[in-house]
């Protein structure tokens, strides 16, 4: 029965939006998945989308993108995708699924509209760059 299924909680896995520079010196933003566990997470899949409904009821959506990341070793990270500043006004959702200790886990990370901003930048662990992180 459904009440008998007790899924494990996802711990020590984070998503971060990092401000970087490309080879031309232009500011760009990239989304990363960070494995802060002491073990590898395997077969990582990510579903990404942006959405918002304004006060007038007008709905804005981006395309849903799916990424197969593979394995991420302990205390390491992988880039999910680049992200354009144009979508920072939307809720940006990343639904992560992976295997850890032979158990499939998943968690949804949502950067609310306007939260990817300079005032919210921190030093992101493991990557050691400025960004906004959800754990």
Image: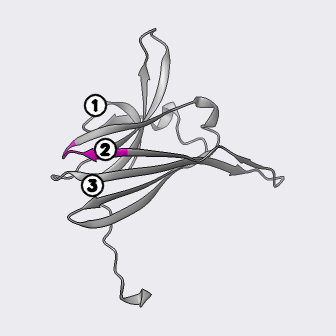
The stretch drawn in magenta includes residue 71: yes
Q: Secondary structure at mark 3?
A: loop
**Numbered mark located on residue 34 in the image:** 2
Look at the picture and state if 109 lies above or below 80.
below
Q: Position of residue 46 (x, y in %)?
A: 44, 50
Q: CA distance from mark 3 to mark 1?
A: 16 Å
Q: Position of residue 17 (x, y in %)?
A: 44, 37
Q: What stretch of residues is rendered in magenta?
A: 69-75
Callout 3 touching callout 1 (CB < 8 Å): no
Q: Secondary structure at mark 1?
A: loop
Query: What residue sits 49% from the left and 23% below the top?
Result: 28
Front residue of 132/51: it is 51
* Residue that sits furthest to the top in the current view: 24
Residue 135 seen: no
Query: What residue sits 27% from the left and 68% below the top?
Result: 103
Query: What residue sits 43% from the left and 86% below the top?
Result: 2
Q: Which residue is mark 3?
A: 12
């Amino acid at each position: 029965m459904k009440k008998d299924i007790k899924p494990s909680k996802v711990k020590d896995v984070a998503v971060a939006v990092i401000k970087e520079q490309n080879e031309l010196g232009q500011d760009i933003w990239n989304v990363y998945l960070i494995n802060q566990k002491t073990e590898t997470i395997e077969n990582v899949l990510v579903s990404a989308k942006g959405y918002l409904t304004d006060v007038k009821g007008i709905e804005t959506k981006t395309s849903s993108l799916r990424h197969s990341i593979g394995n991420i070793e302990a205390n390491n990270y992988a880039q999910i995708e680049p992200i354009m500043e144009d979508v920072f006004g939307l809720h940006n959702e990343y639904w992560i699924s992976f295997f850890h200790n032979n158990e499939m886990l998943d968690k949804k990370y949502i950067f609310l509209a306007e939260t990817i901003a300079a005032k919210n930048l921190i030093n992101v662990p493991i990557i050691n760059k400025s960004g906004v992180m959800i754990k």
